């Protein structure tokens, strides 16, 4: 029993320490993973796994390793901010894959980036015809940035000389059947006004799964019982 409790404590500790380190590094590191971030994450994962299951290595040594690795990672991030040369070595640099509509096969070969991978990534950006593409850049986080040719760009309201309407950030009002009092008070929304709209739909607050005031000022409701007899479930 003592052995099981020790494994549980070590596993939970490993997870909490990794969450703390991730929070310390910030959201940008998690969302934009570069070479440096990838190597750091793999190493931290290995150390955390040993912290959880390897009883032969003392906990204090593993925690020390995580702290040192985290500080080293932060130091490298700081260095990459101060030096362009260091940034290219630590995080890598963007690579152009298509220029003026022409595929740069030499760059593709250097990156071991196949045409299948290129086409798949373009399809994920709703581009099914490569002839529509002017520029493609593979960023340091492994994602593609795409610029279409002029004739295939989407028309904007400015192009049509239409007046843009003012929009606001959506405000969540109800979640899981509970009113979000802080959101209501901070945005000057009347609770009575919200309740009146719920009553108009013949519902109570407890019936509302989610409610939000959208960017155009309209209310969106989703109820627990939506009246869908046979919902589609794709496995």
Image (tube, rainbow, N blue to C red):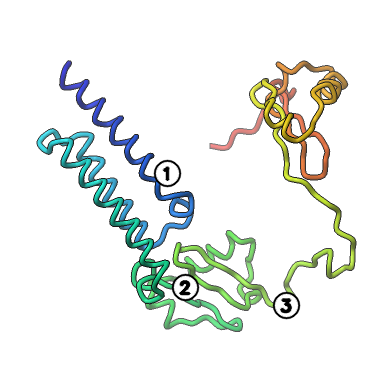
Compared with residue 50, is residue 145 higher up or lower down, i.e. above or below?
A: below
Q: Which mark is residue 94?
A: 2
Query: Pointer 2: residues within 10 angstroms few (<14), some, or many (20+)?
Result: some
Lower position in the chain sequence, tag 1 or tag 2: 1
Q: Along the line of sight, which residue is nearer the eye, 127 or 181?
A: 181
Secondary structure, mark 1, is helix
The residue carrying mark 1 is 23
Query: Is 75 placed left or right of 196 in the picture?
Result: left
Residue 178 spot, x, y in % from top left: 67, 21
Quadrant in the picture for residue 19: top left
Q: Which mark is residue 51?
A: none
Q: Residue at x 85, y 18 (%)?
A: 199
The residue carrying mark 3 is 150
Q: Residue at x 21, y 47 (%)?
A: 65
Compared with residue 104, is residue 27 higher up or lower down, i.e. above or below?
A: above
Cα–Cα span, label 3 and label 2: 23 Å
Residue 226 spot, x, y in % from top left: 73, 24
Which is closer to the viewer, label 3 or label 1?
1
């Amino acid at each position: 029993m003592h052995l099981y409790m020790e494994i549980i404590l070590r596993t939970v500790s490993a997870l909490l320490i990794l969450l703390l380190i991730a929070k310390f590094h910030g959201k940008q590191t998690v969302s934009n993973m570069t070479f440096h971030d990838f190597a750091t994450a793999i190493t931290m994962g290995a150390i955390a796994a040993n912290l959880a299951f390897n009883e032969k290595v003392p906990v204090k040594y593993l925690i020390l390793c995580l702290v040192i690795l985290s500080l080293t990672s932060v130091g490298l991030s700081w260095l990459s901010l101060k030096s362009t040369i260091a940034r290219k070595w630590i995080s890598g640099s963007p690579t152009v894959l298509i220029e003026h509509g022409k595929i740069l096969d030499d760059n593709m070969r250097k990156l071991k980036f196949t045409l299948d991978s290129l086409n798949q990534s373009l399809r994920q950006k709703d581009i099914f015809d490569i002839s529509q593409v002017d520029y493609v850049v593979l960023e340091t986080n492994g994602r593609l940035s795409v610029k279409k040719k002029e004739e295939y760009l989407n028309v904007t309201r400015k192009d049509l000389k239409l007046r843009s309407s003012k929009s606001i950030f959506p405000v969540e009002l109800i979640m899981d059947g509970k009113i979000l009092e802080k959101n209501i008070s901070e945005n000057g929304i009347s609770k009575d006004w919200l309740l009146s709209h719920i009553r108009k739909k013949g519902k109570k607050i407890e019936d509302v799964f989610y409610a939000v005031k959208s960017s155009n000022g309209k209310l969106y409701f989703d109820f627990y019982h939506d009246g869908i007899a046979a919902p589609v479930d794709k496995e």
